[in-house]
Image: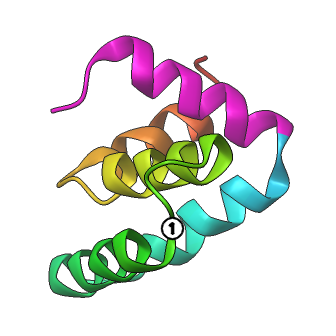
Amino acid sequence: MIDEKTIQEIIAACTSDARLFSIIEDLKTKTKEERFVIRKKASIILSKVNGIEKEALKFYYIITEDGVIEEILRRLKRGKT
């Protein structure tokens, strides 16, 4: 599982940016295999050098980890940040 600080950062980002929340909402409907495919595509499309794209790639890697999306949504629903 991902560390607590990282989960808190994603929750804060989702709270302030509806686009990130919408990505989380969309990915929650995907199977584990579909999430892995999205992770692979993100790693092909996004640069590992460019700062913004590197952060986006990190975001996709983290949220496609098993159980992370569910935990983020659970906390957002409870209002815990």
Q: Is residue 77 above or below residue 26?
A: above
Q: Nearer the viewer, residue 38 or 50?
A: 50
Tell me what residue is drawn at x 51 percent, y 20 percent. 8
Q: Is 14 part of what is drawn in magenta?
A: yes
Please give the residue where the numbered disc 1 appears in the rendered image: 46
Q: Is residue 62 above or below residue 11?
A: below
Tell me what residue is drawn at x 34 percent, y 15 percent. 4
Q: Position of residue 76 (x, y in %)?
A: 60, 36
Identify residue type, mark 1. Answer: Leu
- Label 1 neighbour load within 10 Å: few <14, some 14-19, many 20+: some
Q: Is residue 59 above or below residue 43?
A: above
Q: Is 67 part of what is drawn in magenta?
A: no
The picture quadrant where one finds residue 2 is: top left
Can the viewer see residue 74?
yes
Tell me what residue is drawn at x 38 percent, y 52 percent. 63
Q: Nearer the viewer, residue 51 or 30?
A: 51
Q: Position of residue 54 (x, y in %)?
A: 51, 47
Q: Position of residue 71 (x, y in %)?
A: 36, 40
Q: Position of residue 56 (x, y in %)?
A: 56, 52
Can the viewer see residue 78?
no
Q: Report the predominant secondary structure element of the magenta stretch.
A: helix
Q: From this viewpoint, which residue is outermost toward the front?
A: 49
Please identify the quadrant where the N terminus is shown: top left
Q: Which residues are magenta?
A: 1-16
Q: Nearer the viewer, residue 57 or 1?
A: 57
Would residue 58 be found to the left or right of residue 65 on screen?
Answer: right
Q: How many marks?
A: 1
Would residue 23 be found to the left or right of residue 59 on screen?
Answer: right
Tell me what residue is drawn at x 70 percent, y 66 percent. 22
